[in-house]
Amino acid sequence: MSRVPGSWPPVEIEPPVLHPNAPAPGTDLGVHFAECFGCGEVEGGLHLRSSVGDDQTVQSKFTVTRAHQGAPGLAHGGLLACAFDEALGSAVGNLLRRPAVTGRLETDFRRPVPVGSTLYIEARLDGTAGRKIYVSADGRLDAPDGPVAVSARGLFVQVGIEHFSTHGDPQALEKLAEAQRKNQINP
Ligand SMILES: CCCCCCCCCCCCCC(=O)SCCNC(=O)CCNC(=O)[C@H](O)C(C)(C)COP(=O)(O)OP(=O)(O)OC[C@H]1O[C@@H](n2cnc3c(N)ncnc32)[C@H](O)[C@@H]1OP(=O)(O)O
């Protein structure tokens, strides 16, 4: 439950329809892009690991290191928001297979998250309204049933694939496509 006032999702939605090639519950989602700060092998990155859960969810976890501090000994709020962006984006990308970017991300920080702790994040698809995809997540401390430390909800907006080549790095995009072909990920 969010502390931000207002109903969620804020518009009338349709139930999410999983892509026919969406990975089955239990599937390890691996690294979607080696240079991704959220899940890639980036020094100081979050190294978030995700797998498909039941009921249109993605389960992710990451361990807070000294590289992630804001206040001494505590995770930086912006980095926690980053972890949720990644977990929510992974749910959208893997379960719906619709290219999308974060349009809006809200986070509620409920408990401090100390260095050394592991955050267990469950991200779920809430619904869609045309190009708009609504998702939300809870992050629990140190166990899948631990106390909720952070909650988030986000709006992802579906874009054409040219969004990434126009605004991003076409060569990196080609590397990503190559990695997906190697891992036999069907679009
Ligand atoms: C197999 C594959 C696996 C892949 C795994 C992937 C894992 C990935 C994990 C990584 C995850 C990391 C992910 C990242 O880091 S994504 C990086 C961070 N995000 C961005 O860079 C996005 C930048 N923004 C844009 O490009 C544009 O603004 C977008 C594309 C979002 C919309 O511009 P566009 O001109 O195209 O469309 P529009 O403006 O008509 O908007 C469309 C609709 O949306 C509504 N709207 C928009 N914004 C908001 C808002 N803030 N609050 C409320 N509503 C908002 C808007 O009212 C409209 O609604 P309606 O009027 O139609 O009703």
Image: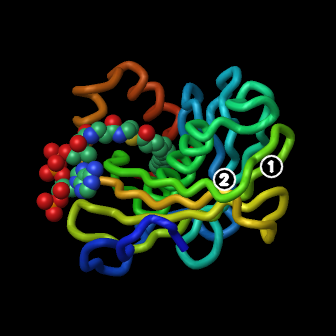
Residue 129: horizontal and vertical position, in percent?
Answer: 24, 70
Q: Residue at x 32, y 48 (%)?
A: 103
- Examine the rendered structure and indicate whether residue 45 appears above or below residue 112: above
Which mark is drawn over residue 158? none
Total numbered labels = 2
Q: Quadrant of residue 162?
A: top left
Mark 2 element type: strand
- Report how far apart the C-alphas of labels 2 and 1 lie in the structure: 13 Å
Q: Which residue is drawn at 70% across and 24% down?
A: 44
Residue 63: horizontal and vertical position, in percent?
Answer: 78, 42
Which mark is drawn over residue 50? 2
Q: For mark 2, does the 10 Å Cα neighbourhood hold few (<14), some (14 to 19), or many (20 or more) residues?
A: many
Q: In which quarter of the image is residue 77?
A: top right
Residue 92: horizontal and vertical position, in percent?
Answer: 44, 58
What is the three-letter code of the residue carrying label 2? Ser
Q: What residue does disc 1 label?
A: 118
Give the left or right position of residue 40, taking residue 160 as reference.
right
Residue 76: horizontal and vertical position, in percent?
Answer: 65, 36
Q: Nearer the viewer, residue 145 or 158?
A: 145
> Mark 1 or mark 2, which is nearer the start of the sequence?
2
Disc 1 under 8 Å from ligand 1? The reply is no
CB atoms of marks 2 and 1 within 8 Å:
no
Give the left or right position of residue 53, taking residue 8 as reference.
right
Disc 2 under 8 Å from ligand 1? The reply is no
Q: Quadrant of residue 142?
A: bottom right
Q: Which colour scheme is used?
A: rainbow
Q: Nearer the viewer, residue 184 or 123?
A: 123
Q: Residue at x 40, y 26 (%)?
A: 174
Which part of the image, by quadrant, shows the N terminus? bottom right
Give the left or right position of residue 184, taking residue 101 as reference.
right
Q: Which residue is drawn at 30% across and 80% down?
A: 14
What is the three-letter code of the residue carrying label 1? Thr
